Amino acid sequence: MSSELGFAVPCSRRAFLKGVAVTTAATASGALLAACASEKTVAKAKAAQVPVGGAVFVDDWIVAQPKEGTFTAFSNVCPHARGKIDHTEEVNGVQVAVCPKHGSEFSLSDGSVLKGPSRDPLTAAKGVTKNGDSVEVSN
């Protein structure tokens, strides 16, 4: 078979479409495997160091224990203006994560906004697991 330019075309339409199908299947398989890959541990804290009702800051994460034995973790980046949340404060008898940039306050239980200007909650870790005497945060 030759093209309009006079040189030979190395494959038929059927062979070309078969190649496209194989390439598409391979690409889709790779994307599926990446999506199903296990979550990566991004932070680790000693469970005993995470106070009940409070939190510790580990790398880029806020690791909290809102109730005894229940652990949560959130990114320490404030969704309002990307400030770095670096402490908690007691507000009405409850510890909350506070952004020093504009004063937004967030729940340590679910990351929800308790006081703006932030309108969006904290970004939760994909997984928080108690493994022996450690709490592991995965994303």
Image (cartoon, rainbow, N blue to C red):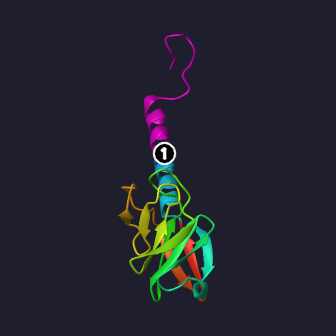
Q: Does 71 appear in magenta? A: no
Which residue is located at x 50 percent, y 15 percent?
3
Q: Position of residue 31 (x, y in %)?
A: 49, 53
Q: Position of residue 94 (x, y in %)?
A: 42, 79
The crowd level at tag 1 (other Cα within 10 Å; few <14, some 14-19, many 20+) is: few
**Against 121, is 136 above or below?**
below
**Against 71, is 102 above or below?**
above
**Against 58, is 67 above or below?**
below
Which residue is located at x 47 percent, y 29 percent?
12
Instruction: Give the camera-side residue of 26 and 13.
Output: 26
Residue 125 visible, this angle:
no
Which residue is identified by label 1? 22
Which residue is located at x 50 percent, y 80 percent?
54
Which residue is located at x 36 percent, y 55 percent?
119
Q: How many marks?
A: 1
Q: Quadrant of residue 59?
A: bottom right
Q: Position of residue 51 (x, y in %)?
A: 54, 85
Instruction: Give the camera-side residue of 67 and 24.
Output: 67
Q: Position of residue 33 (x, y in %)?
A: 51, 59
Q: Secondary structure at mark 1?
A: helix
Residue 68 visible, this angle:
yes
**The residue positioned farthest toward the front in the image shown:** 92
Segment tinted magenta in the rendering: 1-24
Please name the amino acid that badge 1 sits on.
Val
**The residue positioned farthest toward the top in the image shown:** 5
Instruction: Give the camera-side residue of 92 and 24.
Output: 92
